[in-house]
Image (spheres, helix red, strand yellow):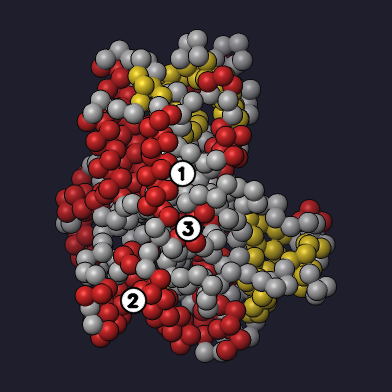
Amino acid sequence: MTIATSSARETSGPDRPMQLDAAVIGAGVSGLYQLYLLREQGLSVRAFDTASDVGGTWYWNRYPGARFDSEGYIYQYLFSEELYKDWSWSEKFPAQPEIERWLHYVTERLDLRKDIQFDTTITQARFDEATGRWRIETDRGQAIDARFLITCCGMLSAPLRDMFPGQDTFEGEIFHTARWPKTPVDVSGKRVGVIGIGATGIQVVQTIAGAAGHLSVFVRTPQYVLPMKNPAYTSADQEAYKAKFHDLATRLPHTFSGFEYDFENGAWAEKTPQERVEILESVWQDGSLKLWLASFAEIFFDEGVSAEISEFVRGKMRAELKDPKLCAALLPTEYGFGTHRVPLERGFLQAFHRPNVSLVSVKDNPIAAVTPRGLRLADGTEVPLDILILATGFDAGTGALTRIDIRGRGGRSLKEEWGRDIRTTMGLQVHGYPNLFTTAAPLAPSAALCNMTTCLQQQAEWISRCIAYMRERNLHVIEADEAFQDEWVEHHDGIAAATLVTKTNSWYMGSNVEGKPRRLLSYIGGVGTYRQKCDEVAASGYSGFSLR
């Protein structure tokens, strides 16, 4: 059954809460699918989103150059062949406007809009131990009473915005890439500064370099980059990838990263030097993330292999940059390839050869403050700007939930607990918070190391089936056992510790947020392995969880 959305919105309040079987936070890729699955069970369910429309990440991140770095034909829902085949991508790595249109297409085809409330921020949620239900409040003074609370907030949805002293004094325009306005931002003839060259900063720089009057790129941590080859699709191309639907639906959930490709080249040690180079050249020429996620798995745990592949990538970048000063600033040397998020680029390296583009290294001369007219560095250098773009990243994995006041049994605070130690049970629940399910949360592949739709679909389906299991048996409350959560954290940490990823500083480890507990946010044991472990838990009648 569905609820009467208009009347529910008007009549619910602190003294008359909206009654739901399930409340979903978020209307992005996972939230839309979670809403669909629970509604198909006949539950009264409603999704809430701060945004004014669907899309999640692809609603907020509309900055210049925003696009997939997963191939469009795998970044899709795979539960319906008809839904899949009735949409056609125009190119291999589609841009944000097309992605947003696709999510509107899904929303309309599944008739989801009537059960989504936009322009609404969930501010707090408290578990009532007497009723076994969640009491949820919004920024509109609305109260919701729900049996289940399911967070589909996204793992990169809590932007780091107030980064530098003096931001509020800037007399020009200032934008964070994750809160980009819908109205166009005109950079033509302007002095523009971009802070950050992660995946987002790279897309912005390569897109606006030709239009800006002068572009200053503030670089602290250099990034390994791979080339993006993005051919336009003909109707024949579209039919070809659609013909692979059943193969993709079978394959994607079981690869290491949820992508179409996987580590199938054999062991590094078994190859001759010439064979290794040939494989690396082949995956480099693919123009995708294949070199990272489907060349040699040893890049994640063998320092010798990591060093050789890192130098291979640096060599490719060096050939593009040429200038020794650019190479010194933009070639990573302090960490290995693949231990950070690997961006794709189309003209980023070449942008620094433009006469109107300046590289400003802030590694040893950091940004001291934003001034009314630009940026001031630690040594007193002033960089005048008309527009400042913050590509400064996110409080990944945890930030979307810790910005909500979530209280579990005994009034325990999720923000406080994760402020001490980031722990979850398979990224699906947290001990002490009954009937709270999470997607894209820490300690699951969906926190970073996965083609997101592959992992988010799997988590939404697991949650939906768990709720169906409970309903069939007249059970009302489920909570992860502390002992099982401890086992999962130990398993997660054991695998993580064997990799080079934990030996670097990046947002993967929470290193970009001061005071954040250090732990690899994403499960690195592989998407297929994670799915198998989740399936085993379900098949056992949800052992490791207490149900009543």
Residue 216 locus on image (x, y percent)? 67, 74
Mark 2, other Cα within 10 Å: few <14 / some 14–19 / many ≥20 = many
Would you identify the image quadrant in which residue 384 lies? bottom right
- Disc 1 to disc 3, C-alpha distance: 15 Å
x 25%, y 86%: residue: 274
Q: Is residue 83 visible?
A: no
Residue 347 locus on image (x, y percent)? 48, 77
Q: Which residue is mark 2?
A: 284
x 63%, y 55%: residue: 176
Residue 297 locus on image (x, y percent)? 31, 65
Which quarter shows the C terminus?
top left
- From what the image shows, is residue 51 above or below residue 368? above
Q: Which residue is mark 3?
A: 502
- From what the image shows, is residue 70 above or below residue 58? below
Q: Nearer the viewer, mark 1 or mark 3?
A: 3
- From what the image shows, is residue 270 above or below residue 122? below
Q: Which residue is mark 1?
A: 442
